[in-house]
Amino acid sequence: MQLTDSLGRTINYLRLSVTDRCNMRCSYCMPAEGVARKCHDDVLRYEELHLIAETAVGLGIEKIRITGGEPLVRAGIVEFLSRLSNIDGLRHLALTTNGLLLDKMAADLYEAGVQRLNVSLDSLKSETFAAITRGGDLDRVLAGLDAAEKAGFPPPKINMVVMRGVNDGEILDFAELTRSRGNSVRFIEYMPVIKEEGWQRYCISGEEILERIAARHTLEHVCKGAFAGPSRDFRIQGARGTLGIITAVSGHFCGECNRIRVTSTGQGKGCLFSDEQVNLLPFLRPPSPANLARALRGIVMAKPQGHHITNNGYEHQNFTMAQIGG
Ligand code: SAM
Ligand code: SF4
């Protein structure tokens, strides 16, 4: 079954957030003091998350990415993933993590049926990494990358949020990882989700990132895979990994958007940057699969044509990325 929105876009990808808690405090994602903790009852139980996943797959979703907050801090996550990977019709189960707990958990995640890991990593310099993440330990993340491969995963995809004056001097070092370690690297434009004065100073367009890499390397275009997201992908000649730019801010990839999102508190969203959300709790407590399916289909049909974050007068919304799952 194919799930198509009102503009004819195929929607086959669900980003499912399992928690808004995190063991890091990345400066671009949440305030230093963190976000107000949801009370236990507000966060979806695993049975509820499973029902959402199963229902979405029944509608035509083929890929699910588990995200957060930091998904690996939630107790019972491995057992949950194991159940998820057994959903009939789910073709691809992926997880996005900051990597801090990966060295301990990689083998269990592989065993549970997770097929692909994305690791968010914004600097290869310990001090810069600690500054961006407000105290994160780079060595643990690097150990996590090694552990993932040892466990049997393909080299994890690395997501780097590029910020001018903070880590843009490392763009070429990250591009080099596609050759030296075989990781695929996605360069993500900094998005204004934290209400910070003068946020524009951090922005570097995907085009500029690409130009800086192309000035040093010959890049080949890479054809997109079945569940490819909105990145434009390239390969340095001879490299095992690919590199891609995600131009969420400067680009206009909305025409190719293939995803919906559900937060850990059961809010369904058709667009990361839209205020529109649908409360799925009434269809989960008590469970009502038919109504849940109707609500998920409604989210797909109401997906906006595009976002407006580059418009003058764009108002920061009252959320953090950790609450939605990126
Ligand atoms: N904790 C996990 C992690 O960091 O990978 C998963 C959740 S995190 C919210 C998902 C993704 O959102 C990460 O790759 C992170 O870099 C990205 N992200 C968060 N805030 C962002 C921002 N302001 N601009 C661009 N990307 C952002
Ligand atoms: Fe946590 Fe991920 Fe947000 Fe960093 S980007 S604070 S690791 S949720």
Image: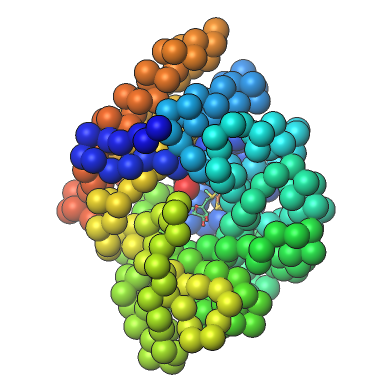
Which residue is nearer to you in this view: 137 or 305? Answer: 305
**Residue furthest toward the front?**
1
Instruction: Left or right? Give the position of 45 relative to 112.
Output: left
**Residue furthest toward the left?**
312
Q: Position of residue 107 (x, y in %)?
A: 80, 52
Instruction: Left or right? Give the position of 274 relative to 150.
Output: left
Q: Residue at x 74, y 50 (%)?
A: 110
Residue 226, compared with residue 317, is above or below; it is below
Residue 281, compared with residue 193, is above or below; it is above
Render colour scheme: rainbow
Q: Residue at x 76, y 53 (%)?
A: 106
Q: Is residue 131 visible?
A: no
Which residue is nearer to you in this view: 159 or 112? Answer: 112
Q: Position of residue 71 (x, y in %)?
A: 64, 42
Say how many tags the image has.
Answer: 0
**Residue furthest toward the top?**
286
Q: Position of residue 102 (x, y in %)?
A: 74, 55
Q: Which quadrant, please, contains the N terminus?
A: top left
Q: Position of residue 319 (x, y in %)?
A: 42, 39
Which residue is nearer to you in this view: 33 or 94? Answer: 94
Q: Residue at x 19, y 49 (%)?
A: 313
Which residue is nearer to you in this view: 266 or 107? Answer: 107
Q: Is residue 281 visible?
A: yes
Q: Residue at x 69, y 31 (%)?
A: 83
